[in-house]
Image (cartoon, rainbow, N blue to C red):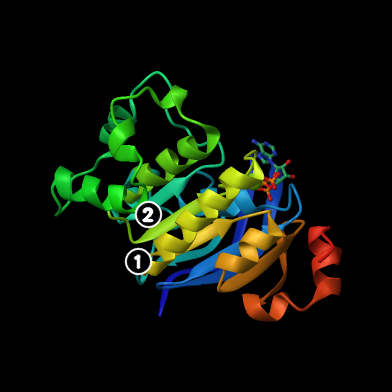
Amino acid sequence: MNLLEVNDIHVYIQSFYILHGISFFVPEGKTTVLLGRNGSGKTTAMRAILGLNPPRKGEIIYKGVNIAHLPTHKIVQRGVGYVPDTRRIIKSLTVEQNLEIALRKGSKTYDERLSEIFELFPDFERFLGQKAGSLSGGQQQMLAVSRALINDNDLLLIDEPTEGLSPLLAKNVLKTLHAIKEKRKTVLLVEQNFAAAKSVGDYYYIFDDGKIAHNGKMETLVDDHELISRYLGVNV
Ligand SMILES: Nc1ncnc2c1ncn2[C@@H]1O[C@H](COP(=O)(O)OP(=O)(O)OP(=O)(O)O)[C@@H](O)[C@H]1O
Ligand SMILES: [Mg+2]
């Protein structure tokens, strides 16, 4: 079943025509990866889902309801978590304060939610009282992911989690993405690191200049060297 279906969305930023009729599906319990060169429209697609850049035309069906014209807070309340490429953690606050300000009402207690986060990130138990700005880049990224997980969201949108991290820290983030997947979470991921994308992704969509150039199961893309070098500019 598809948790999310994006049908032929056309998105403008001011007068610029950015997404020219994009469609994609996000099946429940799977990781769907958006690929494509810089500026091809991946972040804009995520922001469209969140109502930050709503489409002028087209539908965004989440749990069977068209959310394309809802305000962002209503979309978030329906269980959509966002880890933006800018991370947006507050460095002068502690780890725990960063988690607390992200909290929404829900069925689970705060302690239950925290213990789920500690399962994924055992180190965080020690770091709770520490200023977020004192964490390493990889830990800050994991804090950004935790803020989306603490609300028991059904869909997680994660934009370039390994960007700017050393290979070792990127590997830790990738491990986290695998752990999230094992919990049967549904993830829409933007990931430029092709090795990371292919290891965690079930399905892919390749963006090219505001359109989808290709899509399919990740395992089929893995063998298509010509396609990968044409649209992603990496040689594998
Ligand atoms: N605020 C804005 N004003 C005008 N154009 C914008 C704005 N934000 C994005 N764009 C343009 O929209 C297009 C798509 O940008 P977007 O950020 O969605 O790409 P992306 O695939 O996420 O790229 P990257 O890999 O660099 O993150 C680009 O041409 C970009 O210049
Ligand atoms: Mg982007």
Give the residue at x 42% y 56%.
Answer: 156
Residue visible at 26% across and 53% down in the picture: 116
Q: Which residue is mark 2?
A: 80
Q: Is residue 102 above or below residue 228?
A: above
Vertical placement of 155 versus 39: above or below? Answer: below
The type of residue carrying mark 1 is Lys
Residue 123 visible from this viewpoint: yes
Compared to residue 198, the image places residue 216 above or below, namely below
**Is 133 placed above or below 140 here?**
above
Q: Are marks 2 and 1 in contact (CB under 8 Å)?
A: no
Which quarter of the frame holds ligand 1?
Answer: top right
Q: Nearer the viewer, residue 201 or 120?
A: 120
Which quarter shows the C terminus? bottom right
* Residue type of the residue flagged with mark 2: Val
Where in the figure is residue 139, as x and y percent of width and height?
A: 46, 37
Report the number of discs: 2
Q: Quadrant of residue 202?
A: bottom right
Query: For the residue with label 1, is its CB less than 8 Å from the closest atom of ligand 2?
Result: no
Neighbor class of circle 2 (other Cα within 10 Å; few <14, some 14-19, many 20+) is many
Q: Residue at horizontal 30%, vertical 53%?
A: 119
Residue 29: image location, x then y, percent? 40, 72
Residue 177, image x and y in percent?
A: 48, 58
Of marks 2 and 1, the one in the foreground: 1
Residue at disc 2, secondary structure: strand
Quarter holding the N terminus?
bottom left
| Left or right position of 224 against 41 | right
Residue 51, position as x, y percentages in the image: 46, 48
**Residue located beneath label 1 in the image:** 183
> Dot 1 surroundings within 10 Å: few (below 14), some, or many (20 or more)?
few
Q: Does any atom of ligand 2 lie closer than 8 Å to the CB of label 2?
A: no
* Mark closest to the chain's N terminus, 2 or 1: 2
